[in-house]
């Protein structure tokens, strides 16, 4: 008695052939090496494909009544479940044009009649080996893609951790906390999502770019590491000269990101947004901001979003030079800056989702 495990391991072949003699010949020829299913018409062959498991290979006669091989092959290729099964045509026609027609229709090979047992076994064996090799290669490729995806995720997680640590280092010099960073990056993401369908912002605020904005936002004040303590931590109002030095933090932030770009020899979306935010988040819509005094749409979208996020968080937070304002007070103050400090459409989006800002602030509240 044969081992059923070995029987089950044999590749399955479906033979669709209207000639009884050829069916018998092919069955006797293949049955010792393969699990053979026979169908004496195209319709029966298609019905056989509805019964699992699917065959590893199909031998298909071209010249059959009612439904010829081309019609059967067309149905096989049209079905996603069977489209990848290799099909070898069997035909008495040996003209090159017929062979080319079969290959164009999707057949992988072409065996002419009268049937030669040696040729059939060789072609079937070769095609099954090719199919197995493809499947092995596909599994290997799938494994490689999984490994690359896992490694990429690991690298991105490490990058995000380093960025957050750098941003926290800058914020601790300003008596702020890591929660300020978390709040502002969530504010930016919320604003970007609120504006993603707006005609003025649709091109920039794609899903991919919103994710990059979220990840680059923590670097907005990285340049503060270059500001002297006596200015950065001064409890009172800065003098004019001191304020000029304070304003340099935008240049320092831009320079830090540019140094990374120069080291890499190129830039990318993340670094571009980080540079725009670090350098431009103190610009104002009416041109009275710094460092460049940009006006209106000349200010990068990323910096306009960050301006709203940063000012709101500064207002609701206790600082060395001011108490914390309530959400309502902060919203009222910011509303006065519509069209002056802030892009009107960005400020309107903020007002529309202000409850989201309040929720983010509550979720990442600073601890005393």
Image: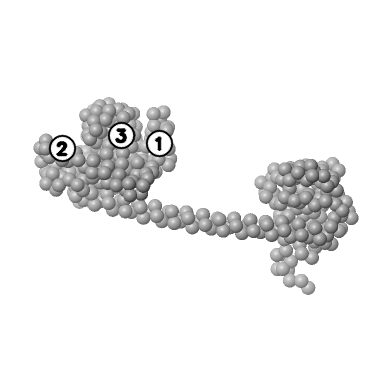
The residue at which mark 1 appears reads as 205
Decide which of tag 2 and tag 3 comes sooner along the chain. Answer: 2
**Res. 341 in view:** no
Disc nearest the viewer among 2 and 3: 2
Q: CA distance from mark 1 to mark 3?
A: 13 Å
Image position, residue 255 (x, y; %): 26, 44
Image position, residue 84 (x, y; %): 67, 50
Q: CA distance from mark 2 to mark 3?
A: 22 Å
The residue at which mark 3 appears reads as 304
Q: Residue at x 48, y 55 (%)?
A: 148
* 238 relative to 64 in the view: left or right: left
Of 318 and 254, which appears nearest the observer?
254
Q: CA distance from mark 2 to mark 1?
A: 33 Å
Q: Residue at x 72, y 68 (%)?
A: 6
Image position, residue 157 (x, y; %): 38, 54
The local secondary structure at tag 3 comes to helix
Dividing the picture into quarters, in which one does residue 219 lie?
A: top left
Dividing the picture into quarters, in which one does residue 36 lie?
A: bottom right
Density class for disc 3 (Cα within 10 Å; few <14, some 14-19, many ≥20) is: many
Total numbered labels placed on residues in the image: 3
The local secondary structure at tag 2 comes to helix
The residue at which mark 2 appears reads as 244
């Amino acid at each position: 008695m044969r081992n059923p495990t070995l029987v089950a391991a044999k590749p399955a072949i479906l033979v669709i052939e209207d000639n009884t003699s050829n069916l018998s010949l092919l069955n006797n020829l293949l049955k010792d090496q393969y699990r053979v299913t026979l169908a004496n018409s195209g319709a029966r062959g298609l019905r056989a494909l509805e019964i699992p498991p699917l065959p590893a290979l199909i031998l298909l006669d071209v010249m059959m009544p009612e439904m010829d091989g081309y019609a059967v092959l067309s149905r096989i290729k049209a079905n996603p479940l069977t489209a990848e099964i290799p099909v070898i045509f069997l035909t008495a026609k040996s003209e090159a044009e017929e062979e080319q027609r079969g290959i164009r229709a999707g057949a992988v090979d072409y065996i002419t009649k009268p049937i030669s047992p040696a040729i059939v076994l060789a072609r079937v064996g070769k095609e099954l080996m090719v199919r197995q090799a493809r499947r092995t290669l596909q599994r290997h490729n799938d494994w490689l893609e999984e490994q690359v995806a896992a490694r990429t995720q690991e690298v991105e997680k490490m990058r995000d951790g380093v960025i957050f640590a750098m941003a926290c280092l800058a914020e601790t010099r300003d008596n702020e906390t890591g929660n300020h960073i978390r709040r502002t990056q969530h504010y930016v993401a919320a604003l970007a999502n609120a504006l993603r369908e707006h005609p003025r912002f649709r091109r920039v605020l794609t899903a991919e770019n919103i994710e990059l904005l979220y990840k680059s936002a923590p670097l907005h004040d990285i340049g503060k590491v270059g500001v002297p303590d006596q200015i950065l931590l001064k409890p009172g109002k800065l003098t004019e000269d001191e304020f000029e030095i304070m304003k340099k933090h935008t240049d320092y932030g831009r320079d830090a990101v540019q140094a990374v770009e120069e080291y890499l020899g190129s830039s990318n979306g993340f670094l571009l947004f980080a540079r725009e935010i670090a350098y431009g988040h103190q610009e104002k819509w009416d041109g009275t901001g710094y460092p460049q005094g940009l006006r209106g749409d000349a200010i990068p979208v990323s910096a306009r979003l960050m301006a709203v996020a940063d000012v709101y968080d500064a207002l609701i937070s206790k600082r060395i030079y001011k108490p914390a304002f309530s959400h309502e007070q902060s919203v009222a103050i910011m509303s006065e800056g519509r069209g002056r400090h802030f892009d009107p459409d960005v400020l309107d989006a903020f007002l529309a989702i202000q409850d989201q800002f309040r929720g983010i602030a509550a979720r990442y509240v600073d601890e005393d």
